[in-house]
Amino acid sequence: MRVLSGIQPSGKLHIGNYFGAIAQMLKLQEENELFAFIANYHALSGGADLAQLKNNTFEVAVDFLSLGIDPQKTCFWVQSHVKEVLELYWILSRYTPVGLLERAHSYKDKTAKGISPSHALFSYPVLMAADILLFDAQKVPVGKDQIQHLEMTRDIAIKFNNEHGEIFTIPEAYVEESVATVPGIDGAKMSKSYGNTIEIFMEEKALQKRCNKIVTDSTPMGEALDHENCNVFAICSLFLDEEQKCELAQRYRSGKEGYGHFKKYLKSLIWEHFEEARQKRAQYMENPDTVYEILEEGAAKARKIASAKMEIVREAVGII
Ligand code: ADP
Ligand code: TRP
């Protein structure tokens, strides 16, 4: 099965990105043909700080490799190294009704939050469709917020195929329900744009500080705590199996510990979970050329597939 996903280099990766997207990719790369890329063109569509874009692109690449994307198994590249995607984006625009884009939640949400309503922001789902259709991806692991974009991709592909024959594979979104929305420190969806994230590679002290900021209720020490509505519990759960979750719930009910204890526990869970990745990350940061080589190899492989696909697409639409 061909699986593809991209992530924007719009800031430091957080545990919402990890559980919502990256962890799925790591699982999927074991038994599938995985295509993973850094969506740096997408970063031009919103509020990303362009002065940081180059550096963020590199750091996200390092983070992915450190977290376990294996270039031996997975084709891993930077979106802008395979220019065919921009050509397909334009061609697909012909098959994209404006009404379809106008219904996009993410466009409405982002403009409501003050991001300027540029053409890039509006047509972003078409670029995402190009990313996916160029590689004939069958399965696309994403967080819940991206499901509508996948539906749009399918609509565009079906419209194209109806006119030209079975040229594009119709992809499906793959969402892991248990981690569909990771809450941030304020209980809303964890997101860079809400300033409520816990970054994967924070320094240890900063990480504890961040965990301490998680909003909890004001149940006094000595009383049983409500784990079901607790953000600390929800985030801890991501790292625990069923039995460990039951044990933690029991500790909440016992009334013997306060939120401070559970925030320390959460910090230790995060810190230990990413221990190995942190070490790999330090090595990659010291050897940037290794990272560039991996990305160049990935881009070469991706380009080969993309250019063959574009020949078929151009032929179908009569572009010489
Ligand atoms: P952000 O909202 O922080 O800007 P992105 O939009 O760049 O994150 O998302 C990158 C990937 O991580 C997407 O697949 C998205 O669905 C997933 N993701 C982001 N935040 C969360 C979250 N809080 N819970 C689950 N998945 C998430
Ligand atoms: N739009 C996705 C996001 O913001 C990133 C992305 C770009 C993507 N192209 C993609 C995800 C193709 C999956 C497939 O998270």
Image: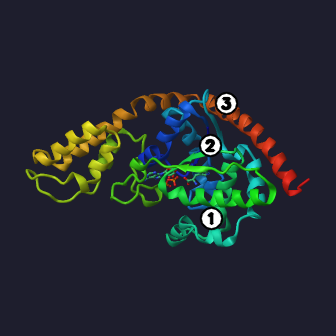
Q: What residue type is labelled 2?
A: Phe
How far apart marks 2 and 3 lie (CA) works out to 15 Å
Query: Circle 3 sits in a helix, a strand or a loop, which is it?
Result: helix
How far apart marks 2 and 1 lie (CA) works out to 19 Å
Within the image, what quadrant is residue 117 found in?
Answer: bottom right
Query: Circle 1 sits in a helix, a strand or a loop, which is it?
Result: helix
| Disc nearer the start of the sequence (2/1) | 2
Residue at figure coordinates x 50%, y 33% from the top left: 66
Q: Pointer 3: what residue?
A: 293
Residue 310, horizontal then vertical, whole percent: 80, 47
Residue most toward the right?
Answer: 320
Cβ atoms at labels 2 and 1 below 8 Å apart = no
Residue 233, horizontal then vertical, whole percent: 27, 48
- Give neighbour class at mark 2: few <14, some 14-19, many 20+ (Cα, 10 Å): many
Q: What residue type is labelled 3?
A: Glu
How far apart marks 3 and 1 lie (CA) works out to 31 Å
The mark closer to the camera, 3 or 1, is 1
Say if 148 sits above or below 76 in the image. Answer: below
Q: Pointer 1: what residue?
A: 121
- Between residue 68 and residue 244, name the one nearer to us: 244
In the shown orientation, is residue 211 left or right of residue 130?
A: left
Q: Pointer 2: what residue?
A: 37
The mark closer to the camera, 2 or 3, is 2
Q: What residue type is labelled 1?
A: Leu
Within the image, what quadrant is residue 118 found in?
Answer: bottom right
**Would the CB of label 2 be found within 8 Å of ligand 2?**
yes
- Give neighbour class at mark 3: few <14, some 14-19, many 20+ (Cα, 10 Å): few
In the shown orientation, is residue 255 left or right of residue 38?
A: left
Query: Circle 2 sits in a helix, a strand or a loop, which is it?
Result: strand
